[in-house]
Amino acid sequence: MDNINLKKLISDIEQKIRDYQNQVEFKVLEKAQFIVQVGALTVTTDANGVVKTQNVCYPTQFTQKDVNEILNVPFRDGFGGKIYPKIYSRINWYSEKLTELNETFNLISAIKEPQ
């Protein structure tokens, strides 16, 4: 990895860490406070209300009623095996991802460029 790409990657991770830290620190009462994760993806709905999975930095948040409906949707992996969704509060989801980002940042920051 060249030095320019490494600096850009580190800068992008630092920005996402700041953004996610703000999400964790921003505490408000929310009706839609849950994030549903299926494997490595999060759940969203399209304009017609169809449940879909997505890979995004800022996932869709749902109410408890919505979560109950989503739990009735069968999710399958590429081999046809059932995948069970995990339900997170917004703060817990962002906290977990923040921990992962900090670990990644520390590993990438430790990379030494060849002399």
Image: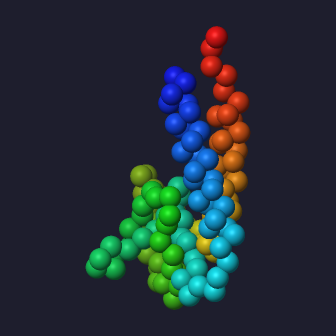
Q: Is residue 103 above or below residue 75?
A: above
Instruction: State the image coordinates of residue 114 (x, y, percent, origin top left).
Output: 62, 14
Q: Residue at x 69, y 69 (%)?
A: 25
Q: Nearer the viewer, residue 64 or 25?
A: 25
Residue 88 visible (yes or no): no
Instruction: State the image coordinates of residue 11 (x, y, percent, origin top left).
Output: 57, 42
Residue 112 visible (yes or no): yes
On the picture, is 44 further left or further right than 95? left
Q: Nearer the viewer, residue 24 or 18?
A: 18
Instruction: State the image coordinates of residue 74 (x, y, percent, origin top left).
Output: 44, 71
Q: Residue at x 50, y 58 (%)?
A: 57
The outermost residue toward the left is: 48
Q: Quadrant of residue 75?
A: bottom left
Question: Which coloring applies here?
Answer: rainbow
Q: Is residue 104 above or below residue 57?
A: above
Q: Residue at x 64, y 11 (%)?
A: 115
The outermost residue toward the top is: 115
On the picture, is 74 further left or further right than 105? left
Instruction: State the image coordinates of residue 95 (x, y, percent, origin top left).
Output: 68, 62
Q: Quadrant of residue 110?
A: top right
Q: Nearer the viewer, residue 28 or 101?
A: 28
On the picture, is 48 further left or further right than 87? left
